[in-house]
Image: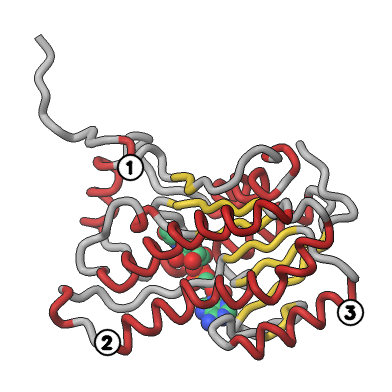
Amino acid sequence: MFDLTNKVAVVTGGASGIGASCVEVLRSTGATVAVWDLHQVPGVIGTDVADPAAVRRSAEIVLDAHGRVDLLVNCAGVITQNLPAQDVDPADFRRNFDVNVMGIVNSSQALYSALAATGAGAIVNVASQAALMCLPHQSAYSASKGAVAALTRSLAIDWAGDNIRVNAVCPGFTLTPMAVQQMTPELNRAVSQRVPLGRMFQPEEIAQTIAFLGSSWASAVTGVVMPVDGGWTAGEPALPMGVE
Ligand code: NAD
């Protein structure tokens, strides 16, 4: 296992689900981890990532406490109600973009100088399988995650000269509060047939990939938008292609 001792990480959305697993996995590798989340639970720096001034204040708190930031994991995200595209309220589109896209812009800009100062900074954005293969009745969420993929590549190019690596993961269905609220027995069955590995994922399976991308073990990797989806985006396993 790689060692992140003496490294400082910020995890947004770290109070729940994939973000909370990232905090655990990163701490297990020796990193000091600061958590930003809308939910103000003990040990968390209350932050709305959609608010640039709030994000700048949280960045100052971390830098005052630890003097550096080596890794930013942009995990905070929202999903809005399932609706056909013609019925989606523009406010829902805006909310998905404010948190899922602008949250990453705000956090990455606020920590850019600190990440550059380390000489080997890293950002890992949490996009979604919806960035690569859209989910039905989730146009706002899917569009926002597609933007996260493009933003990841843009930041990777712009900040390569500062030796800041920027990558993204695209999780498949992962058993967190966000996904469980969408789950029905029919969806559960459909996912297990559609996903080549035949199952949903535990948050730590996503967090381990994020920790790898954030570590020096991935020192040559930047601008990658990586599915962590059990093969969902690799192909269509349920097509009835007969074997002679
Ligand atoms: P979750 O709801 O368990 O956790 C999301 C966290 O983000 C919460 O703690 C929430 O308070 C925080 N958050 C929301 N808005 C915020 C804001 N404005 N500022 C700060 N924090 C905010 O959900 P999760 O499933 O762990 O999702 C984490 C990320 O993974 C999201 O970006 C989500 O889109 C993505 N994702 C999840 C799945 C899945 O199946 N669970 C699949 C693909 C992608």
Label 2 sits on what residue type? Pro
User: Whole-Å distance between the Cαs marked 3 and 1?
Assistant: 42 Å
User: Relative to 44, does residue 197 appear above or below in the rendering?
Assistant: above
User: Whole-Å distance between the Cαs marked 2 and 3?
Assistant: 39 Å
Q: Quadrant of residue 196?
A: top left
Which residue bears the numbered disc 3? 64
User: Whole-Å distance between the Cαs marked 1 and 2?
Assistant: 28 Å
Which residue bears the numbered disc 2? 90
- Residue most extreme to the top: 244
Specify whether 175 is left or right of 70. left
Q: Secondary structure at mark 1?
A: helix
- Decide which of tag 1 and tag 2 comes sooner along the chain: 2
Residue neighbourhood size for the residue with mark 1, other residues' Cα within 10 Å, grouped as few (<14), some (14–19), many (≥20): some
Label 3 sits on what residue type? Asp
Quarter of the picture containing the N terminus is top right
Residue 176 appears in view: no
Label 1 sits on what residue type? Thr
The yes-or-no answer for disc 3 within 8 Å of ligand 1 is no
The answer to whether mark 2 and mark 3 are in CB contact below 8 A is no
Q: Can you tell which mark lies on residue 244? A: none
Q: Can you tell which mark lies on residue 233? A: 1
Residue 230 appears in view: yes
Residue neighbourhood size for the residue with mark 2, other residues' Cα within 10 Å, grouped as few (<14), some (14–19), many (≥20): few
Specify whether 109 is left or right of 101. right
- The mark total stands at 3
